[in-house]
Image: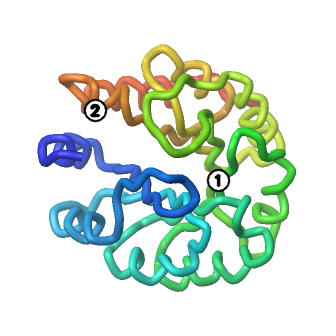
Amino acid sequence: MGKFSCYALIAVEIIFIKTIWHFVPNLTIGAPVIKSLRKHTKAYLDCHLMVTNPLDYVEPLGDAGASGFTFHIEVTKENWQELVERIKSKGMRPGVSLRPGTPIEEVYPLIESANPVEMVLVMTVEPGFGGQKFMPEMMDKVRTLRKKYPSLDIEVDGGLGPSTIDMAASAGANCIVAGSSVFGSPKPAEVISAMRKAVDEAPRIV
């Protein structure tokens, strides 16, 4: 993410950060970048951790100024309660993500807990590398979540852009992560604004 890209995204008030270490082989952004960004913006900094040990990163990301901390259900089935509590104690908003092959039912306990996650991220590509094709079959998970939890924040990540945003928004996703379609555009802020408009104008599932 270059200097121009950072400031273009700051202009639209939200930045989704992929923090990747051990769960997948590709490294992107860590706590030092979050700290640097926080010096220049009050934007919501949402961190998606594809790691095997997310508890180790709660304190450094919280101290760096992260706003949201999303972990994967696949590696936290035994300790998610402690993780959610720690995330909230550092002033961050907890979210849970699931890979395309993970049944949606696995996140229900985290949503229905007395101390719940506040967002569910449905991966629409296999996590790890950008530029993959959007998996439309994942919209069944989004629709299921939206019908079961009408007020839940539902995020989608992977292959999102002008040609797929309407599909995601109409399924019930209200938080959109886009990488290649934004950074590959000469006008990234305009791409983000157009996708935000699609979400705002999508028909509501009731």
Disc number for residue 84: none
Amino acid under disc 2: Phe
For residue 45, which quarter of the picture? bottom left
Residue at point 64% right, 23% down? 170
Q: Nearer the viewer, residue 114 or 82?
A: 82
Amino acid under disc 1: Ser
For residue 43, which quarter of the picture? bottom left
Give the colouring mode of the picture. rainbow
What count of labels does the image hold? 2
Q: Position of residue 102 (x, y in %)?
A: 78, 46
Residue receiving disc 2? 183
Q: Position of residue 10 (x, y in %)?
A: 23, 49
- Alpha carbon of mark 2 to alpha carbon of mark 1: how far? 23 Å
SS label for mark 1: strand
Residue at point 32% right, 76% down? 64
On the rendered structure, is 113 left or right of 39? Answer: right
Q: Nearer the viewer, residue 8 or 174?
A: 8
**Vertically, is 72 above or below 58?**
above
Q: Is residue 26 visible?
A: yes
Q: Nearer the viewer, residue 167 or 74?
A: 74
Q: Position of residue 135 (x, y in %)?
A: 64, 25
Q: Position of residue 88 (x, y in %)?
A: 56, 78
Residue receiving disc 1? 97
On the rendered structure, is 7 left or right of 184? Answer: left
